[in-house]
Image: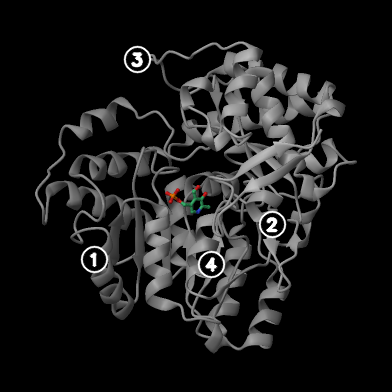
Amino acid sequence: MHTIIEPFRIKMTEPLKITSRDDRVAALAAAHHNVFLLDAEDCCIDLLTDSGTGAMSTEQWAALMLGDESYAGSRSWKRFKASVTEITGMPHVLPTHQGRAAEAILAECVLNPGDIVPNNSHFDTTRANIEYRGAVALNLPCLEAFDTQAEAPFKGNMDVDALRACIAEHGADKIPFAMMTVTNNTGGGQPVSMANLREVKSVLAEHDIPFIIDACRYAENAYFVREREEGYSDRPLIQIAQEMFALADGATMSCKKDGLANIGGFLVCRNDAWAEQFRNLLILREGFPTYGGLAGRDLEAIAVGLREALDYDYQVYRHATVEYMVRRLTAIGVPMVRPAGGHAVFLDARQMLPAMEPLQYPGIGVVNALYVAGGVRAVELGSVMFGHFDDKGVEQPAPLELVRLAFPRRVYTQSHFDYLIEVIEQVWRERDAIPGHRITFQPSLLRHFPCHFELLK
Ligand SMILES: Cc1ncc(COP(=O)(O)O)c(C=O)c1O
């Protein structure tokens, strides 16, 4: 059969509110033209994020009932730890309430002002946690990552020569650890090859620099390695994941992605001294080390979800969805990051609106047009999220202006995706009418969440 079906059936439904264009124009104006400030119920297809928005399986719902809510040493903790240890092979496991809490603990314990942390591309919370410590979050993506149209198989890779140059310039003492984000969310959900991970590891090992994986989408990355990298086509995904983690000294994880849970995260490492420091701060910030910031039932759901994410048929279906979208949108002519990434479709707003200045935020224009056209909520990954102010206080745009349509796991069906294609097609046809935006309110950190916009025409 050519049709790849959802490898599950639906047991419970959740209604979607169908709104009119006028309703959506009014809702967006009330939200200061920032989709983060909309009410979720006013979004028909909510693709703001794939984080924590997935549907749990029957096995996970059943596991919730096994939740042992004991303060210390619960059975749920043991099951959680067993799953995490099996997959990552790390001796020290610290549960956290989500990924950014793991990042915060790592950054607070290990970083000093002026330190440098290289990564293929930092996610926004990772960057913010590093910068909050006065350190520098340095992105070193491979060169193909800048060409949204290049059909390279592993555009999430790090530029290893740039890593070497960074170590030579700043010295290993200034680099308490380096990171790799798999898959590379900021760079279009593109995968990292095992060969690149190995090369990065070997450069870091030469200089005794610890290597940390941001593992949010470790299972999607493992699937890409199996499909695209020589020598892995017959390997179970769990073995590929284990090989990835074997290269690392630690990892931060948001279980809201490939943990297939609605909340949760963890920090793992091999270094005993680090683990001791992490645990002390974990108790202060999150909770006792056997529950972190989580209820026993959450630990149970994650213990099951981490393994379900490595199910090959589930990954085949998930990737087929993204590929289907990319194929259909390519036929229409919509510019996008190519090839298909793991968890989302990334529209190229700069190419969609070539005449618009980057600091008029073309990505925000496209995001808001998608909402007005069909109640679809997407997110800008461009100059609002990743722009910065230089030493003179002048705003500098981001290198790419992308719009991410992230797909919650096991939530939407084929007809939702066909509707989505229709909405995007309408926005593409009517793109000349999309206005620029100006920021009227912004905080100093993570401004994309609460900022306000006004329309420029
Ligand atoms: C690559 C990456 N790292 C870290 C995080 C932060 O995880 P959390 O939202 O659980 O704090 C995210 C969340 O989207 C992410 O995509």
User: Which mark, residue 284?
Assistant: 1
Q: The residue tagged with tag 4: helix, strand or loop?
A: strand
Q: Which amino acid does label 3 sit on?
A: Met
Locate residue 419: give its quadrant: top right
User: Which mark, residue 141?
Assistant: none
Which of 27 and 239 lies nearest the eye of the viewer? 27
Q: Which amino acid does label 1 sit on?
A: Leu
Q: Earlier in the sequence, mark 1 or mark 2?
A: 1
Residue 355 % position (x, y): 90, 41
Q: Which residue is at 9% across, 49% downward?
A: 70
Q: Which amino acid does label 4 sit on?
A: Met
What separation in Å lies between label 1 and label 3 (alpha carbons)?
A: 39 Å
Q: Which residue is at 77% across, 41% downward?
A: 362
Residue 358 % position (x, y): 80, 49
Of badges 3 and 2, the one in the foreground is: 2
Q: The residue tagged with tag 3: helix, strand or loop?
A: loop
Q: In the displayed structure, would residue 194 be above or below residue 210?
A: above
Q: In the displayed structure, would residue 424 be above or below residue 272?
A: above
Cβ–Cβ under 8 Å for marks 3 and 2: no
Residue 236 visible to the viewer: no
Residue 237 % position (x, y): 47, 46
Residue, far front: 440
Q: Mark 3 points at which residue?
A: 12
Q: Which of marks 3 and 4 is nearer the N terminus?
A: 3
Q: Which of marks 1 and 3 is nearer the N terminus?
A: 3
